[in-house]
Image (spheres, grey):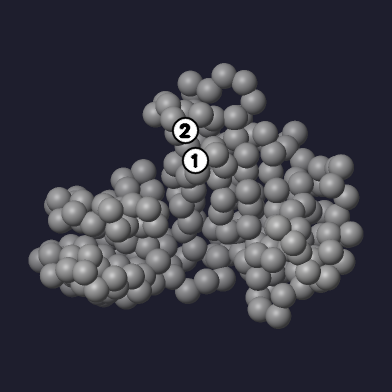
C-alpha cells in the first residue's frame, strides 16, 4: 500500500522499534494526525486467542467514559409497550416485522447499532445474512438483546462500544477522536483495556495480548507497551 507525503512525514515521528507508554503513545498519535477531518483514534489489539474455538472467543461491550465523539443511530426491534419505551429513550428508529423487507429488499441500513427484545429475535434472525456480515446482529453478550431497552439505548448513546475478535484474532475499536484532549483519550483507553483484560478466556494457554497499536484513521501505528496488561 502506497502512502502519501503527509503519512511519510508523520511516520518519521514514530520509532517502530519501541513500545511507548500509554500517555506517550496517545500524545504521539495526536501529533501524527494530518487529515483535514477529525480523525478517529483506533486501538488494534493482537491476541493469542484462537477464535475458531468457542472457549477462546473474546466478545463484549464497554461504555467509554468520554464517549466516542460519534453520533450513533440506534434501531430497536420491539413490540407493544417496549416500542413506546424505546421511542421515549431516544431510539432513532423503532419497529418490528414491517422493517424486514425495508432492510432485506430496499437495502435500508441507516443505523449503527441494532437492539432487540428477546421476543423479537425470531424476526431479527431472518436478517442474519444482511446484519451478520456488517457486525450489526444483536447479541446478549454485547447487551443488545435485552428487555431493558432504555438502559441499552442510554449506554449506546453515552459511548458504548462493542469489541470482538476478527478472523485474524485481532480486536479493532475506536476510543475517541483526535480533537479529544489526551486525558479523555487516556480514560477511554484505560476503560477499554480493563474490560478486555477481564474478558481473557480462561481456556487460553500462553500470552493473551501480543501487541497493542494506537493509530488515527489515516495515520501510522504507534505500539503501546503491553507489559502493564
Q: Is residue 85 visible?
A: no
Q: What is the crowding at mark 1: few (fewer than 14 residues within 10 Å), some, or many (at least 20)?
A: few
Label 1, on which residue? Answer: 167
- Tell me the SS state at disc 1: loop
Q: Residue at x 87, y 66 (%)?
A: 9
Relative to 98, is 125 above or below? Answer: above
Q: What is the crowding at mark 2: few (fewer than 14 residues within 10 Å), some, or many (at least 20)?
A: some
Residue 223, position in %: x, y?
76, 47
User: Is 80 displayed left or right of 215 in the figure?
Assistant: left
Q: Residue at x 86, y 55 (%)?
A: 14
Mark 1 to mark 2 CA distance (whole Å) = 7 Å
User: Is 159 displayed left or right of 148 in the figure?
Assistant: right
Residue 204, position in %: x, y?
53, 23
- Mark 1 or mark 2: which comes first in sequence? 2
User: Is 126 displayed left or right of 219 in the figure?
Assistant: left
Q: Where, by quadrant of the figure, is residue 85 drawn?
A: bottom left
> From the image, which quarter does the N terminus lie in?
bottom right
Label 2, on which residue? Answer: 51
Residue 62, position in %: x, y?
49, 51
Q: Residue at x 37, y 63 (%)?
A: 113
Q: Residue at x 66, y 78 (%)?
A: 37
Q: Is residue 101 visible?
A: yes
Q: Where, by quadrant of the figure, is residue 19 drawn?
A: top right
Tell me whether circle 1 and circle 2 mark residues in contact (CB < 8 Å).
yes
Amino acid at each position: 500500500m502506497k502512502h502519501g507525503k503527509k503519512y511519510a512525514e508523520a511516520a518519521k515521528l514514530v520509532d517502530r522499534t519501541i513500545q511507548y507508554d500509554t500517555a506517550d503513545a496517545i500524545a504521539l498519535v495526536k501529533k501524527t494526525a494530518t487529515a483535514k477531518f477529525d480523525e478517529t483514534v483506533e486501538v488494534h489489539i493482537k491476541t493469542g486467542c484462537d477464535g475458531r474455538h468457542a472457549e477462546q472467543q473474546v466478545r463484549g461491550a464497554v461504555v467509554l467514559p468520554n464517549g466516542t465523539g460519534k453520533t450513533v443511530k440506534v434501531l430497536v426491534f420491539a413490540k407493544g409497550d417496549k416500542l413506546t419505551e424505546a421511542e421515549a429513550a431516544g431510539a432513532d428508529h423503532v419497529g418490528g416485522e414491517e422493517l424486514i423487507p425495508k432492510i432485506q429488499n430496499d437495502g435500508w441500513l441507516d443505523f449503527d447499532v441494532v437492539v432487540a427484545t428477546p421476543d423479537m429475535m425470531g424476526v431479527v434472525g431472518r436478517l442474519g445474512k444482511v446484519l451478520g456480515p456488517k457486525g450489526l446482529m444483536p447479541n446478549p453478550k454485547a447487551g443488545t438483546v435485552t428487555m431493558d431497552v432504555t438502559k441499552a439505548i442510554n449506554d449506546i448513546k453515552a459511548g458504548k462500544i462493542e469489541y470482538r475478535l476478527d478472523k485474524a484474532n485481532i480486536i479493532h475499536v475506536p476510543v475517541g477522536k483526535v480533537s479529544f484532549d489526551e486525558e479523555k483519550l487516556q480514560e477511554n483507553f484505560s476503560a477499554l483495556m480493563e474490560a478486555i483484560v477481564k474478558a481473557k478466556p480462561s481456556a487460553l494457554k500462553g500470552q493473551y495480548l501480543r501487541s497493542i497499536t494506537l493509530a488515527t484513521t489515516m495515520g501510522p501505528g504507534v505500539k503501546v507497551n503491553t507489559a502493564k496488561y
